[in-house]
């Protein structure tokens, strides 16, 4: 018989359980992707451009036999399934708030065609792990122990199916223009290459180096994990039983991704609402000018400005710097975390609702297992510690390129401020006490 394989966040052919399941049921399979405005609209050019490239790469691996339709999946998926006489529609489980709603509606509209979910974008499907009392985890460390104990299935076997030639040849609307940005090379082959070379020459030293934005010390695989060009299970299998700080540290970072997906699964409203509702009473400012300076990297704090400009230039920002700029927005500018989260989602190629919103809440102190609110990042000492020679700042802030060494983190101390670079828009020491006062007022 025939089956429909509907790709969503799993734009690859290797280690794809949904494909293995389709191959068990049918010998002829049609590959489908639905361009869904509900998902595309908030994505922003960088992520849409990367998706565009991933779809081209996937179509390439399928010799063009990928049907792309534009519209509402609730209408399009049943229509395409019926048009090929499919007995089943195969997908990877989507546990996000929109994906769950959409999939319920699509499955209900299928009318006699089986809906089959196999695998998910995670090594352990969100919702699977609960505390012994049946409650969801709220703290990472016990989640991590349970996740390791649970383990994960081996990579899915590769399946050969007869891909159905779609009625319409593969085509995409024109690629969104991300402007003069340098985006990662899209697709499964690129992801596998990056991962293989990381295992060979990057893993060694990862634990010690991953906090250093001046060095290429992390995998930079987040956009590929976001779109499923590579599955974390593949990575975990390659890490195998390797012990040692580097492998352990990478496993734990992958587990943070799974933890936040699990939190969002149990508490979908935390995509827009404080996880800890006590913070609903925190007093925020509404200064649009401060937000614009943060957004464009003109706060006068070099590490903050470098990070915000890296985001605009590459659609990616180093994790340590994401924490520093997020803390600055919430605790130095007293602006709500969701404004920053929305800006990130618009510009990040790896923008992911669970990882983004809940990491923001972690930094803001409003989330699960958060950094305590009173632990406030000092942007200057953070810069000096994690970018000790100032190389990261000089790379992204040309106005500061002439300042040698770590002096670049305090340009206001120079006899003359470099031309075109602003003075700090706020005094960190002062704003810190303002933030603590507001916090004490609600706790
Ligand atoms: P590596 O260090 O190589 O880590 C490997 C993988 O582990 C990453 O690709 C990612 O999938 C996962 N990972 C690592 N750290 C985290 C973390 N703290 N939380 C969740 N997963 C993690 N990550 C996203 O994928 N999408 C987002 O939208 C996103 N928004 C963030 C917003 C803020 C405010 C902060 C502080 C962090 C955010 N992160 C987000 C997490 C993290 O910054 C990125 O995953 C990481 O920088 C990606 O780079 P990498 O692939 O080189 O990471």
Image (cartoon, rainbow, N blue to C red):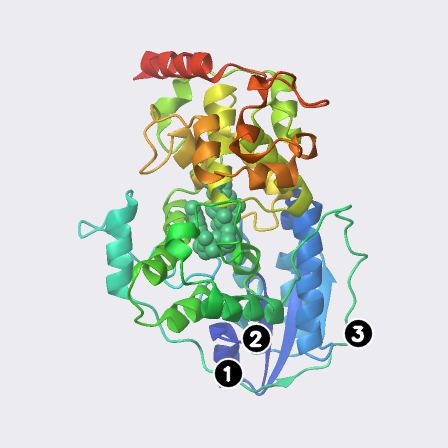
Q: Nearer the viewer, mark 3 or mark 2?
A: 2
Q: Is residue 439 rendered to the left or right of residue 192?
A: left
Q: Do the residues bearing badges 2 and 1 touch, measured as CB atoms within 8 Å? A: yes
Residue drawn 37% across the image and 11% down it: 437
Instruction: Give the residue at x 30% y 46%.
Output: 140
Residue bearing mark 2 = 13
| Residue at the extreme right | 174
Q: Write the residue at 37% across / 35% down.
A: 367
Q: Is residue 9 left or right of residue 43?
A: left
Residue 186 in the image: x percent, y percent?
A: 65, 62
Which disc number belongs to residue 415?
none
Q: Secondary structure at mark 1?
A: loop
| Nearest the eye: 74 or 126 | 126
- The answer to which of 42 and 322 lies nearer the viewer is 322
Gap in angstroms between the C-alphas marked 3 and 1: 25 Å
Q: CA distance from mark 2 to mark 1?
A: 8 Å
Mark 3, residue position: 169
Q: Secondary structure at mark 3?
A: loop
Residue at x 49% of width, y 29% of height: 337
Residue 211 percent location from the top left of the image: 43, 45
| The quarter of the displayed image where residue 79 is located | bottom right
Q: Are marks 3 and 1 in contact (CB under 8 Å)?
A: no
Q: Nearer the viewer, residue 161 or 290?
A: 290
Is the CB–ligand 1 distance for label 1 below 8 Å? no
Total marks shown come to 3
Q: Earlier in the sequence, mark 3 or mark 2?
A: 2
Q: Split into 4 quadrants, where in the image is the C terminus?
A: top left
Position above or below: 425 against 145 = above
Residue 291 horizontal/vertical position (percent): 61, 23
Q: According to the image, label 1 marks what residue?
A: 158
Asked which quadrant contains residue 282, the reply is top left
């Amino acid at each position: 018989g025939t089956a429909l394989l509907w790709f969503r966040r799993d734009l690859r052919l290797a280690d794809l359980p949904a494909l293995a399941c389709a191959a068990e049921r049918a010998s002829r399979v049609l590959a489908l992707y639905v361009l869904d405005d509900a998902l595309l609209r908030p994505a922003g050019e960088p992520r849409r451009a990367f998706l565009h490239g991933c779809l081209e790469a996937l179509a390439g691996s399928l010799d063009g036999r990928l049907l792309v339709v534009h519209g509402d999946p609730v209408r399009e998926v049943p229509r395409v399934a019926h048009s090929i006489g499919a007995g089943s529609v195969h997908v990877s489980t989507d546990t996000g708030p929109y994906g769950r709603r959409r999939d319920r509606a699509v499955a209900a509209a299928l009318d006699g065609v089986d809906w089959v979910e196999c695998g998910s974008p995670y090594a352990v499907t969100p919702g699977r792990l609960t505390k012994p009392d049946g409650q969801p985890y709220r703290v990472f460390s016990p989640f991590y122990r349970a996740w390791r104990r649970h383990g994960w299935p081996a990579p899915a076997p590769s399946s050969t199916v007869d891909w159905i030639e779609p009625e319409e040849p593969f085509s995409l609307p024109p690629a969104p223009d991300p402007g003069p940005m340098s985006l990662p090379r899209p697709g499964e082959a690129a992801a596998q290459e990056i991962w293989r070379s990381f295992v060979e020459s990057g893993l060694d030293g990862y634990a010690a180096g991953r906090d250093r934005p001046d060095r290429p010390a992390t995998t930079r695989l987040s956009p590929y994990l976001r779109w499923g060009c590579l599955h974390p299970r593949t990575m975990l299998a390659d890490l195998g039983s390797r012990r040692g700080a580097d492998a352990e540290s990478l496993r734990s970072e992958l587990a943070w991704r799974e933890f936040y997906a699990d939190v969002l699964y149990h508490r979908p409203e935390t995509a827009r609402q404080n996880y800890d509702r006590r913070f609903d009473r925190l007093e925020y400012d509404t200064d649009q000018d401060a937000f614009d300076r943060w957004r464009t990297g003109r706060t006068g704090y070099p590490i903050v400005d470098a990070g915000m400009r890296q985001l605009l230039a590459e659609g990616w920002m180093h994790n340590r710097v994401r924490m520093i700029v997020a803390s600055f927005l919430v605790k130095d500018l007293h602006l709500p975390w969701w404004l920053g989260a929305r800006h990130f989602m618009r510009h990040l190629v790896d923008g992911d609702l669970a990882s983004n919103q809940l990491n923001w809440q972690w930094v803001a102190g409003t989330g699960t297992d958060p950094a305590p609110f009173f632990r406030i990042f000092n942007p200057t000492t953070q810069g000096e510690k994690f970018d000790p020679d100032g190389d990261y700042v000089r790379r992204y802030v040309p106005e500061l390129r002439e300042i040698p060494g770590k002096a670049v983190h305090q340009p206001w101390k120079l006899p003359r401020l470099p031309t075109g670079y602003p003075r700090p828009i706020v005094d960190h020491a002062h704003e810190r006490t303002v933030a603590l006062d507001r916090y004490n007022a609600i706790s």
